[in-house]
Image: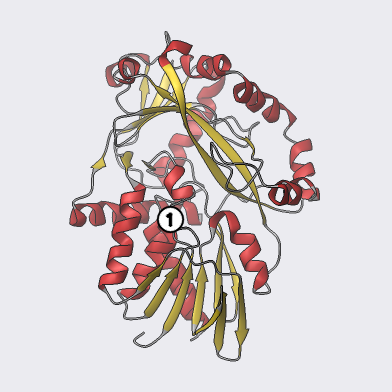
């Protein structure tokens, strides 16, 4: 790959991992990020969980790349001296109606090779999380927490050390193929490459469209607000406490998540965001909101998910309802135990029929490859996704 000129667009953890994969293979790689820092969007606003692979359909890209990604992250963080805490995770059933779904997750986790996964009863729940309740649970002792922003910076450091270039504050406005080259437009310049890989997250559909790719699947941004537990309440949570996913709802629901810095997050809810980058303290975007609500796929999604919208609206407008959902798993939790926390925005790819893309999605043509959908466990899988993207890209040029 020596002298192969490659551009990677997007400085989140997947883009940084992809640039590193290329740089360590002797490609001349340039990583472009429009913000003034790396990991400014989804990577820097997630919960920091390294997922073990419980939920994903066996054989899917998510299942395969999640397990591979965990292995690569463990090795990388050890080499770099970065914190990696296997605090463990409980998926808790509160009622008998949830036991069938819990067993189905256990079967998937077993098929995916999740290490140490076990089904436990009520007494074992309290032995692991003394302040949690439930009638049964899955225990994933190897589920971990990490600082994904620190990992992203370390990945980028490896890019620079291998001779690559990291350009922050540089917006890619268009990508077009000309013969055996790909021209990348940036403000006041045009640069030519042999290959381009985009990992643009919240802007992935728009950037792909500039290179002639299809508009679908489109990104519909969903915000997720978190609360933080006050210090005394936070000491009662040892690891991660999750609900059993309800198939009636497209999103997981409120859970309790210990972070690598010791904070414990409660949430998130999930609701249409007023902008793709409208974090707390930032205004919405009329363009983003218009693009979402003017698209028929969104309304088809909404029509099929009215109960979910009602559930999420309750937690969006009522902190008491938000806390009550968490207190079902940790009795005694009250509104006095929480304070406002961060907001994340999920880049959810949605099809024109209103269906959500559940797996990772990679498209492209010629010398351009686009990562169009990488929801959770995208960060966990980042280094494995990088391997996959680079392999697909090199196949395109023989």
Give the residue at the far front of this rendering. Answer: 188
Q: Quadrant of residue 16?
A: bottom left
Where residue 288 appears, as percent x and y from the top left, is 69, 50
With respect to residue 63, does 101 lie above or below?
Answer: above
Give the residue at the far bottom of this rendering. Answer: 179
In the visual, does 370 lie left or right of 7?
Answer: right
- The residue depicted at 31 percent of the width and 81 percent of the height is 26
Of residues 311 and 117, the one drawn nearer to the viewer in this rendering: 311
- The residue depicted at 38 percent of the width and 41 percent of the height is 48
With respect to residue 197, does 359 lie above or below?
Answer: above
In the visual, does 192 lie left or right of 239?
Answer: right
Give the residue at the far top of this rendering. Answer: 332
How is the model colour-coded? secondary structure
- The residue depicted at 76 percent of the width and 48 percent of the height is 290
Where residue 17 appears, as percent x and y from the top left, is 37, 63
In the visual, does 244 lie left or right of 234?
Answer: right
With respect to residue 134, does 226 lie above or below?
Answer: below
Where residue 200 appears, as percent x and y from the top left, is 54, 61
Of residues 358 and 238, the one drawn nearer to the viewer in this rendering: 238
Secondary element under disc 1, as helix, strand or loop, is helix
Of residues 368 and 113, the one drawn nearer to the viewer in this rendering: 368
- The residue depicted at 19 percent of the width and 57 percent of the height is 79
Res. 334 visible in picture: no
Where residue 101 appears, as percent x and y from the top left, is 53, 30
Give the crowd class for mark 1: few <14, some 14-19, many >=20 residues within 10 Å: some
Quadrant containing the N terminus is: bottom left
Q: How many marks?
A: 1
Res. 155 visible in picture: yes
Residue identified by numbered label 1: 64
């Amino acid at each position: 790959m020596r002298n192969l000129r490659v551009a990677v667009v997007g400085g989140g953890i997947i883009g940084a991992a992809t640039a590193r994969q290329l740089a360590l293979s002797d490609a001349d790689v340039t990583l472009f990020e429009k913000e003034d820092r790396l990991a400014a969007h989804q990577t820097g606003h997630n919960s920091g969980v390294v997922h073990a692979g419980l939920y994903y359909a066996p054989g899917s890209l998510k299942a395969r790349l999640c397990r591979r990604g965990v292995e690569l992250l463990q090795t990388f963080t050890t080499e770099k001296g970065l914190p990696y805490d296997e605090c463990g995770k409980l998926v808790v059933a509160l009622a008998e109606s949830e036991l069938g779904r819990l067993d189905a997750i256990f079967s998937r986790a077993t098929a995916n090779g999740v290490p140490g996964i076990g089904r436990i009863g009520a007494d074992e729940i309290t032995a692991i999380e003394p302040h949690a309740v439930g009638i049964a649970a899955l225990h994933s002792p190897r589920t971990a927490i990490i600082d994904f922003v620190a990992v992203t910076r370390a990945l980028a450091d490896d890019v620079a050390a291998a001779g690559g270039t990291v350009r922050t504050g540089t917006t890619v406005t268009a990508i077009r193929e000309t013969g055996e080259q790909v021209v990348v437009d940036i403000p006041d310049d045009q640069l030519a490459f042999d290959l381009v890989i985009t990992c643009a997250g919240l802007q992935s559909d728009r950037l792909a469209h500039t290179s002639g790719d299809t508009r679908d699947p489109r990104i519909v941004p969903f915000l997720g607000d978190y609360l933080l537990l006050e210090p005394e309440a936070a000491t009662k949570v040892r690891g991660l406490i999750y609900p059993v996913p309800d198939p009636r709802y497209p999103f997981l629901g409120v859970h309790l998540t210990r972070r690598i810095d010791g904070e414990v997050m409660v949430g998130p809810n999930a609701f249409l965001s007023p902008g793709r980058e409208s974090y707390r303290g930032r205004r919405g975007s009329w363009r983003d909101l218009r693009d979402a609500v003017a698209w028929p796929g969104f309304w088809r999604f909404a029509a099929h998910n009215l109960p979910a919208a009602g559930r999420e609206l309750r937690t969006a407008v009522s902190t008491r309802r938000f806390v009550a959902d968490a207190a079902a798993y940790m009795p005694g939790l009250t509104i006095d135990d929480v304070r406002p926390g961060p907001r994340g925005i999920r880049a959810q790819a949605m099809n024109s029929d209103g269906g959500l893309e559940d797996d990772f999605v990679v498209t492209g043509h010629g010398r351009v490859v686009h990562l169009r959908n990488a929801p959770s466990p995208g960060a966990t899988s980042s280094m494995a996704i990088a391997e996959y993207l680079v392999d697909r890209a090199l196949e395109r040029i023989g």
